[in-house]
């Protein structure tokens, strides 16, 4: 006889809260019933409990106090309930073992841990949420659980992650998305009255070419060209935003290309796991240096990761 279970999955990052009402059916398959969005960790002003309650209130009214799984920056030192960082190398299947459980308005919440690594240059790096998405991707694509593969998870804080036989070996973070947001809204580069317009991929590619082909350390000068190219009437403000995105993403890809932790050669393949727009941007930049890409949807990866952990918990 077919069985089903309901739970709420919450991907709560720096910029956005995304809550998913999920139904797990026979054979552990997941159906997304509904989605509700809310403010990210930074914009929630430390009012995390009420923010979550407000976001999922309609579901509680209909279904009662469902179990909740949360991942992302909400479990960090700037979030709600801090969970530990697990040291790489790590198999993401073990995330549930270090989860922190607590009660919120009658819901039992499991807050998932983050991941940390020490790079060859001695620097320390961390991530929260992406390890869940990596787990989901690997469960959806088991062929990538053998051998080495480089993943790119673009976003507010882009992650470049080296996977070997299903384990997270190490990763590097680039604040590409956050820099873009800051420079668009808190600098002289883009006019405050700039209208929204269709993303100009030609301007984006020009920005990529500038930093992909530049000397090391040329990023700061390249960023200022966003302003000068508007002054010279080469770019409209809308085009300048796409150009700025290209400058930053080109620099990010250039750094990944020369990373000592992996070999990003022209015949290698990178799996890009993000939104449709970001996937296209990073794939475009990587293609410019001859790197082949496979794109995967970040929402699908996120839900797959939550689904795996919920089913794992259900078997206990």
Image: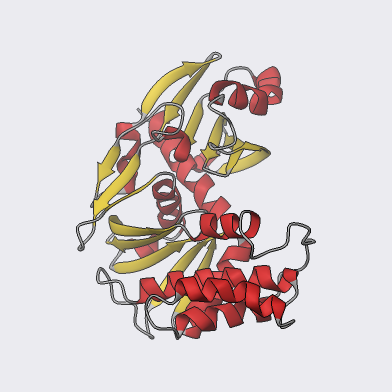
Q: Is residue 180 above or below residue 234?
A: above
Q: Is residue 107 above or below residue 145?
A: above
Does residue 264 show up? yes
Question: Where residue 144 sits: x, y (%)?
Answer: 37, 64
Identify the residue at horizontal 56%, vertical 72% (top origin): 224
Q: How many marks?
A: 0
Quadrant into which the N terminus falls: top right
Question: Where residue 39 sits: x, y (%)?
Answer: 62, 37
The colouring scheme, among rainbow, by chain, secondary structure or one colour, is secondary structure
Question: Where residue 199 sits: x, y (%)?
Answer: 71, 69
Q: Toward which corner of the image does residue 171 lie, by quadrant?
A: bottom left
Identify the residue at horizontal 34%, vertical 60% (top origin): 172
Identify the residue at horizontal 54%, vertical 78% (top origin): 208
- Is 45 in front, or is 104? 45
Compared across the picture, whether 85 is left or right of 181 comes to left
Does residue 155 show up? no
Quadrant into which the C terminus falls: top left
Compared across the picture, whether 81 is left or right of 202 comes to left
Identify the residue at horizontal 19%, vertical 57% (top origin): 122
- Is 45 in front, or is 157? 45
Compared across the picture, whether 31 is left or right of 67 comes to right
Q: Toward which corner of the image does residue 271 lie, by quadrant?
A: bottom left
Q: Is residue 224 above or below residue 41?
A: below
Question: Where residue 15 sits: x, y (%)?
Answer: 57, 44
């Amino acid at each position: 006889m077919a069985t089903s279970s309901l739970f709420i999955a919450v991907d709560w990052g720096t910029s956005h809260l995304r809550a998913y009402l999920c139904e797990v059916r026979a054979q552990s398959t997941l159906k997304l019933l509904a989605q509700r969005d809310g403010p990210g960790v930074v914009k929630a002003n430390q009012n995390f409990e009420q923010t979550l309650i407000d976001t999922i209130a309609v579901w509680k009214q209909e279904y009662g106090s469902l179990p909740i799984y949360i991942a992302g920056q909400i479990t960090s030192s700037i979030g709600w309930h801090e969970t530990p960082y697990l040291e790489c190398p790590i198999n993401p299947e073990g995330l549930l073992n270090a989860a922190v459980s607590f009660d919120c308005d009658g819901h039992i919440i499991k807050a998932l841990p983050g991941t940390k690594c020490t790079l060859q240059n001695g620097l320390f790096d961390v991530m929260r949420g992406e390890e869940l998405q990596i787990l989901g991707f690997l469960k959806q694509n088991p062929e990538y659980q053998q051998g080495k593969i480089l993943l790119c998870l673009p976003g507010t804080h882009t992650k470049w992650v080296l996977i070997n036989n299903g384990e997270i070996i190490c990763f590097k973070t680039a604040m590409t998305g956050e820099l873009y947001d800051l420079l668009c809204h808190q600098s002289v580069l883009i006019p405050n009255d700039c209208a929204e317009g269709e993303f100009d991929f030609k301007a984006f590619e020009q920005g990529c070419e500038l930093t992909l082909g530049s000397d090391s350390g040329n990023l700061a000068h390249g960023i200022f060209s966003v302003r000068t190219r508007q002054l010279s009437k080469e770019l409209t403000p809308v085009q300048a935003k796409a150009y700025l995105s290209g400058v930053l993403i080109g620099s990010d890809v250039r750094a990944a290309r020369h990373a000592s932790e992996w070999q990003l050669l022209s015949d290698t393949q990178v799996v890009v796991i993000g939104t449709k727009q970001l996937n296209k941007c990073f794939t475009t930049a990587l293609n410019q240096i001859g790197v082949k890409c496979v794109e995967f949807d970040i929402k699908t990866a996120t839900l797959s990761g939550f689904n795996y952990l919920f089913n794992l918990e259900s078997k206990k």
